[in-house]
Amino acid sequence: MVKELIKIYYIMAKDVKTYYFKPPNLIMGLMFPAVMIFTFSMRGIRDIMQFLPGLIAMTTFFGASSMETVIIALGRRDKSLERLLMAPLAFRTMLSGKILGGMAFGLVTTLILLPLGVGIFSLPIQKPLLLAVSIVVSAFSFSSFGAFIGVYPRESWNAMSLGNLTRFPMVFLSGVFLPVHKMPFILTKIAYFLPLTYSVDLMRSATINQGNILSWHYSLIILVLFGIFFLWISTKLIKRWLI
């Protein structure tokens, strides 16, 4: 068990050093959420206060999943995943290390933007512990989702296209900009199958105390289950395509 954890750590550390924390990647990870925050702040403090929790969840979502998708695809193309498996490593161990790298990037981008929301817009934090746990669990779920999207394409541009094809609709269907209970009936039902929906609800519960989907206990459990499911199915798929 300890040896497996050490292997997971080194895979994560290698990805973080090689891919994630380069200035262009940090800028791209922060740019879209920052532009959204600036855009909605033009409408006044009251409006931005309603949107900030969702924008925090969106920051975690893009930070944890975007690069993860590309890195998995690059690993398939340059055969680095096969080389890792020759170490030897279990498929689950390899993907866990990859997912931890995405989690780390998502956490860092979120922790850069969160103080801005609190300091500039006086975003209240009603439940600090819930907020911290929600960000970590969301990062795990979203990074696992990014790995799931990345296991199919072999080219980075295909991975980016497929990732954007799934991420951007999810942003508009998960309550980031419009509360789920105000959506049309069919869109509400779709929202319940999206992990970002529960992350947004948790952020709203932890900050402005206005979660409206489920009790935060259930939202946390569902997010964890999403993460485990995406890790499990990614392991199955990559095992099928690499063997």
Image (cartoon, helix red, strand yellow):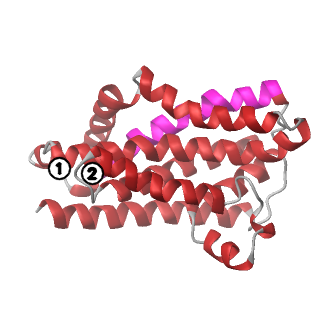
Residue drawn at x 39%, y 31% as measured from the top left? 20
Q: Label 1: few (<14), some or many (≥20) within 10 Å?
A: some
Q: Mark 1 points at which residue?
A: 89
Q: In this rendered view, identify the residue nearer to me: 32 or 83.
A: 32
* Residue type (three-letter) at the residue carrying disc 2: Thr
Label 1 and label 2: CA atoms lie apart by 6 Å
Q: Is mark 2 on a helix, strand or loop?
A: helix
Residue 188 makes an appearance in the image: yes
Vertical arrangement, residue 241 with respect to residue 125, above or below: below
Q: Which image quadrant is residue 91 in?
A: bottom left
Q: Residue 135, how many percent across, how many down?
A: 61, 45
Question: Disc 1, disc 2: CB below 8 Å?
Answer: yes
Q: Which amino acid does label 1 sit on?
A: Leu
- Magenta stretch secondary structure, dominant: helix
Query: Is-magenta flag for residue 110?
Result: yes
Residue annotated with mark 2: 93
Mark 2 nearby-residue class (10 Å; few <14, some 14–19, many ≥20)? many
Q: What element carries label 1?
A: loop
| Residue range (magenta) | 93-120
Up-down relation of residue 101 to residue 243 (above or below): above
- Nearest to the observer: residue 181 or residue 237: 181
